[in-house]
Image: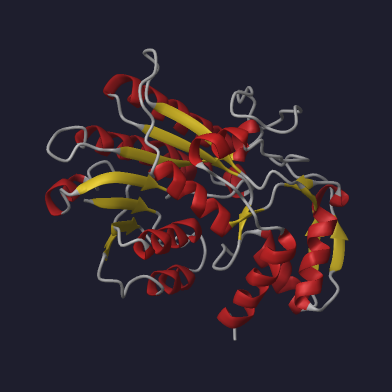
Amino acid sequence: MSVLVTGAAGFIGMHTIKALLERDEQVIGIDNINDYYDPALKYARLAQINNDTNFYFEKVDFSKQTSLNFLNKKHPEIDRIIHLGAQAGVRYSIDHPNQYVQSNLCGQLNILEFCRSKMIAPHALKNFIYASSSSVYGSNTKIPFSENDNTDRPVSFYGATKKAGEIMAQSYSHLYQIPSIGLRFFTVYGPWGRPDMSPYIFTKSILNDLPIRVFNEGQMMRDFTFIEDIVSGIIGALDTPPKTLNETPPHRIYNLGNNKPVSLMEYINVIEKACKKKAIIDLQPMQPGDVIKTYANTRESEQALGYAPTTSIDVGIPKFVDWYLSYHS
């Protein structure tokens, strides 16, 4: 039996695969290696896992309708799926909405159709995990964000596609009894992170004496969550397939955050300390699609999945900066 992981060359995907391989799982990873950012980083991530004999990589664009048909023949042993592939980025979605439709909506549908094809013996699907986002909470003012809060007011198109993905998974779970768990990630950071994410942007700018743009004049808070904590939640979800309860479909949604929001200026200060240099601050107004504060209520994921985030930014940010310096040396 094996696990299919989409977005295998991505930040969260690579770390998740490493964790699965460390417990001797057989993993099939797929990724289209697109050029949203430098593909060299994606290939470098794959190099961290490619030598493991339990890992098989296929270059596949799952947003294309028939792209997954070969998997049932080539890898019939797949019995669990972790769907992490997506078009990421809140601000990028404002100018490139069609890419989000293709990857996050059409791609989600294709993965769900593949799940449906796997609900047949002898290798019936045991669990389907998919990535959602704290962006679904949009303009909510109730803090902290809880899974049963209203998520009908996204402020970015990215958040809208992630909310749509949840609804699509819910419907397929209802129609075909697919055991499914959506995980709402909160501001994930750590080694091998994406170049469009703030740790990478801020670290690069500070080290090169370039100004960093700080939006809403720094009056923002984020629930920064270290990659190892996120992966522990993904593995916990994989090992806890939901069941049908009182005619409720086997579909659950959980927050994966650090449950400790940090101010943007405090966060920058920690990066400065790790870089041993002061930042040049360029205060900017609020950007379209952004929110002032994110804060995850993680009680449900703690109780159901055994999720227990432990990494503060004082520990996690220096690990990121150390990786950044090593990668660019």
* Total numbered badges shown on the rendered structure: 0
Determine whether 78 is above or below 245 in the image: below
> Percent from the top left, x then y, of residue 320?
64, 69
> Percent from the top left, x then y, of residue 260?
73, 46
**Left-right relation of 262 to 201:** right
The residue drawn where x is 39% and y is 18% is 245
The residue drawn where x is 32% and y is 35% is 112
Residue 176 seen in the current view: yes
**Left-right relation of 203 to 150:** right
> Percent from the top left, x then y, of residue 302?
57, 39
Quadrant housing residue 136: top right
The residue drawn where x is 81% and y is 71% is 272
Residue 157 seen in the current view: no
**Left-right relation of 149 to 165:** right
Determine whether 251 is above or below 282 in the image: above
Determine whether 287 is above or below 59 in the image: above
Residue at the farthest bottom position: 329
The residue drawn where x is 34% and y is 31% is 179
> Percent from the top left, x then y, of residue 71?
19, 50
Determine whether 214 is above or below 97 in the image: below
